[in-house]
Amino acid sequence: MCGIVGYIGNRNCLGLIIDGLKRLEYRGYDSAGVAILDKNNDINIYKKKGKVKELESEFNIEDLSGHTGIGHTRWATHGEPNDINAHPQTDMSGNIAVVHNGIIENFKTLKKKLEKENYKFVSDTDTEVLANLIQYHFKQNNNFETAVRYALSEVEGAYGIAVLNRSVPDKIIIARNGSPLMFGLGKDEIIVSSDAAAIINVTKNVIYLEDGEIAVLKYDSFQIKTITDEDIFREVQRIDYDIEEIEKGGFEHFMLKEICEQPDAIQNTYRGRINFQTGDVKLGGLETVKDKLFNAKRIIITACGTAWHAALVGEYMFEEYCRIPTEVEYASEFRYKNPIINKDDVIIFISQSGETADTMAALKEAKRLGATTIGIVNAVGSSIARAVDAGTYIHAGPEIGVASTKAFTCQLMSLVLITLMIGKNKGTISDENLMEIAAELKLIPEKIREIIERKNDFKFIAEEFKDSRNFLYLGRGLNFPVALEGALKLKEISYIHAEGYPAAEMKHGPIALIDENMPVVFIAPKDSTYDKIISNIEEIKARKGKIITVATQDDNEINNYSDYIMRVPKTLPIFSPILNSIPLQFLSYYIATARGCNVDQPRNLAKSVTVE
Ligand code: F6R
């Protein structure tokens, strides 16, 4: 959620660090700061509450030259967002500067210990405690690397850190435990970041640090060790996307760009993985575990937020088409409920970022209990992608807007592919049905394009409802999770209260909320749930609620029941969650922009939630 950037090399680094921080702002953004080592080996620190551009207005870039520095965008965990609590944090002598993502759980104990040694603190942060702890050990042994290692061996919790030491100006030390960190290798320069987005305009050659590792970086060399001082060899990896892919490309917001990218993104999810004639699916990343998957007595899918909604759709798919009992767990609950896991269980982890702390913690627990673990992940090389036994990338491309859009529909497409693969093997989907699904799958990108072309219709509806204070979203079967996702999208970017329910469940309580001021969005595909949905619509109409439907193109009957209609092309049930989600993404986007909300960086939210 917070972002780290660091640089050591032959260039004046402030501009580079600021540029990197701007690319990371989507991860967290209540304050920002930089520490630059100047030619006199003084550490110059600038930090400020607010966005990076507010920090920039604090100083004149020309005045601050230096070839080594670290920077941070913060999403507060300990201490309110203000100038003092912003990172970098220093020890009390100003010798050591630290930027830190994560949470040091035992920081109060460590602080007390240091206070006994007469250390003084000015901020409320756990990071300032770490800076002082490093200085404490540095004073004892005068070795920068040892001091960081000793300090970290006392720390409990999660961290990704970058540390400067004015007494050792030719090095940056970085370390990670539970919070992503990597560094890119340029010519006579190394750039550090918690996210590849800040690295790729310098180099595409990166090294990912693993948990429990520390790296000592000089401008022309590096050394990786474990915190316990064992040498590590790590291959350099190539980042596979370009800077243009993470820029807005003419769209007003990343969210809008990412909604409109869905035809291509979805195509990238299935490209080369399915035979459109036969429906045969081959997912290379799952080869090693496919027998486990085919013989699974039970599948558990775990995830957070939007990815959890994808998991719920997955549950319907696996049960309906593969006849495998499937359970969905919130990742944040999984490890605290003493889960009963058998060795024949397969646990699937869905995550866009591949860094969500709750999902990662659930994964560790699943591995400890001996389950087979599978990832459905977007961010290549991310922590979850590397930790699972096997996995499939969704290939949605970088998703920068905080509200997940294209990653969701690509997660759904990945789940379709897995469903077809299992269904074929188990014979629970007939060859004829497989062929029909495969043929339809090929048409999905074009059908999404058709929906995107109708975006002005959705904008019109958004204008009508932008001042509503509440919304209800209702769907059935495979489209119940779509209702949940529609409600989540709306509340997170427009701050309008919204709830999703299975449509029939409404009469067991939420119906009490209905009056002429309540817009109710029904997902009403022409499938086996249609007649029941119509009855539910009638119940709302009778109470004067405003009806907005997501309905199939050729469905004229729905005109009699809807105040507003968002049309989608006809498709097979297995693809309807993908198509039906898209008008809901537009609806929330246009409502939020009409209300003047910052859709790419909604308040209190961060793209990658790396704290539990
Ligand atoms: C909502 C949203 C979040 C994420 C959740 C999990 O639009 O983006 O609910 O889905 O934080 O994130 P990942 O998928 O990165 O594990």
Image (tube, rainbow, N blue to C red):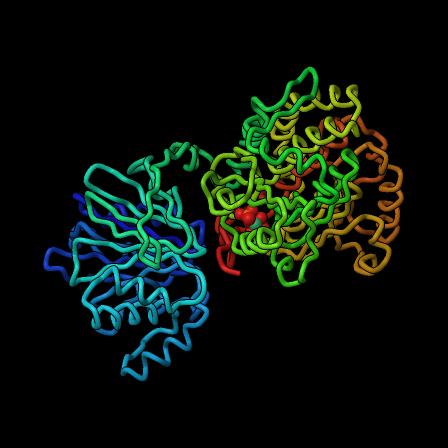
Give the image quarter of residue 2. Answer: bottom left
Figure label count: 0
Q: What residue sits 70% from the left and 56% below the top?
A: 340
22 vs 589, nearest the viewer: 22
**Position of 2 relative to 130 (above/below):** above
Q: What residue sits 69% from the left and 21% below the top?
A: 279
Res. 319 visible in picture: yes
Res. 403 visible in picture: no
Where's residue 216, x and y in %?
Answer: 26, 52
**Going by the image, does 60 lie left or right of 284?**
left
Where's residue 156, x and y in %?
Answer: 44, 67
Give the image quarter of residue 205. Answer: top left
On-image quarter of the N terminus: bottom left
Where's residue 601, x and y in %?
Answer: 48, 51
Q: Residue furthest top?
A: 277
**Going by the image, does 534 lie left or right of 609?**
right
Q: What residue sits 67% from the left and 50% below the top?
A: 487
281 vs 553, nearest the viewer: 281
Where's residue 481, x and y in %?
Answer: 71, 45
352 vs 556, nearest the viewer: 352
